[in-house]
Amino acid sequence: MKNVSERIKKAASKAWHSQVWKYVMVCVIGVVVVGFFSETSVWGHVKNLHRINELTEDIERYQTAFRRDSVQIRELDKNPKAIEKIARERYFMKTDDEDIFVLSDDERAPKPLTIHETTE
């Protein structure tokens, strides 16, 4: 039994002090540093994949908006009533004989009257 343990200790000591062990350790440390701590690491690769997915979603959203806006532009080119509709809805434009009332769902408190304002 004593003979076997001495052989194991001797083999371990030889392996520990051999040149091969040093090369293996350098290679392992190099793989760890390059794989996890450099710019091209595994973590960086995962972050880049996540960013690619976000940008792909952005592309799809912008393409949908582009198609919607293209349809609206074609409609504006064909139909002059569409221009009038947009002017009325977005910019509150009106003809001379019209009144516009803007209704709001805001639950803000009314502003107090200033010195120069009066109520009718």
Image: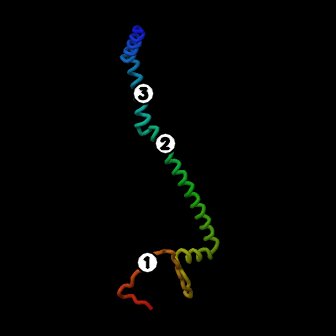
Disc 3 to disc 1, C-alpha distance: 68 Å
For the N terminus, give its image quadrant: top left
Residue positioned most to the top: 3
Find the residue positioned furthest to the front.
Answer: 1
Q: Quadrant of the C terminus?
A: bottom left
The image's colouring method is: rainbow
Q: Residue at x 54, y 85 (%)?
A: 99
Q: Quadrant of residue 62?
A: bottom right
- Across and down, in percent, residue 83 comes to 59, 74
The type of residue carrying mark 1 is: Ala
Which residue bears the numbered disc 2? 46
Residue at image coords 63%, 69%:
75
Location of residue 3 with respect to 48 vertically, above or below: above
Question: Which residue bears the numbered disc 1?
Answer: 109
Residue 53 rendering spot, x and y as whole percentages: 53, 48
Q: Earlier in the sequence, mark 3 or mark 1?
A: 3
Q: Nearer the viewer, residue 9 or 99?
A: 9
Q: Which mark is residue 28?
A: 3
